[in-house]
Image: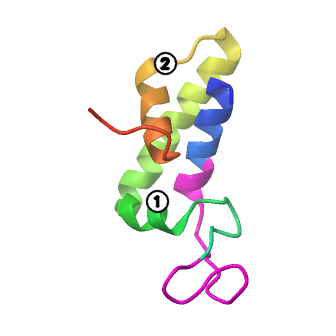
């Protein structure tokens, strides 16, 4: 996945109004399936727990970083690390 795709994925997750199926075979009441809109797992959705204003601001910052990545070809490493945490690919250290 390219840096621009990672940033775009994080933006989709931040802006998504998640809808997790809880009917078999997609999921169950105690283990809902992945979001029908963006594919985010239930575990990631429940641990994000950000307030809506923070989610909106973070999505705008990542949108700016994604634009910069496409225009200049180089990704902002901090924005990319935040996107990777949101995408469940890395953790803050």
Name the side, left or right, on which 77 lies relative to 26: left
Q: Report the front residue among 80 and 24.
A: 24
Which stretch is magenta? Answer: 12-32
Task: Provide the residue designation for mark 1.
Answer: 44
Q: Please, what secondary structure does the residue beneath circle 2 have?
A: loop
- CB atoms at circles 2 and 1 under 8 Å apart? no
Task: Provide the residue designation for mark 2.
Answer: 76
Residues at marks 2 and 1, CA–CA distance in whole angstroms: 23 Å
Q: Please, what secondary structure does the residue beneath circle 1 have?
A: helix
* Residue 8: x %, y % from top left: 64, 39
Q: Is residue 26 covered in magenta?
A: yes
Note whether 77 is above or below 15 in the view shown.
above
Q: Nearer the viewer, mark 2 or mark 1?
A: 1
Q: Residue at x 59, y 86 (%)?
A: 28
Q: Is residue 40 covered in magenta?
A: no
Q: Residue at x 59, y 59 (%)?
A: 40
Image-quadrant location for residue 10: top right
From the image, which quarter does the N terminus lie in? top right
Q: Residue at x 68, y 25 (%)?
A: 2
Q: Residue at x 38, y 57 (%)?
A: 53
Image-quadrant location for residue 9: top right
Name the magenta segment's main secondary structure.
loop
Note whether 13 is above or below 31 in the view shown.
above
Please tell me how crowded label 2 is: few (under 14), some (14-19), or many (20+) other residues with Cα within 10 Å: some
Note whether 90 is above or below 36 in the view shown.
above
- Tell me, for residue 22, which label it has, or none: none
**Residue projecting furthest to the front:** 25
Q: Report the front residue among 62 and 84.
A: 84
Which comes sooner in the sequence, label 2 or label 1? 1
């Amino acid at each position: 996945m390219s840096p621009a795709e990672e940033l775009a994925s994080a933006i989709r997750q931040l802006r998504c109004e998640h809808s997790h199926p809880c009917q078999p075979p997609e999921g169950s009441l105690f283990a809902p399936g992945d979001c029908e809109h963006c594919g985010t797992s239930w575990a990631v959705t429940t641990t994000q727990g950000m307030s809506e204003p923070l989610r909106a601001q973070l999505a705008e910052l990542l949108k700016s970083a994604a634009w910069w990545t496409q225009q200049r070809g180089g990704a902002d490493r901090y924005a990319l690390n935040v996107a990777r945490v949101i995408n469940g690919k890395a953790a803050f250290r």
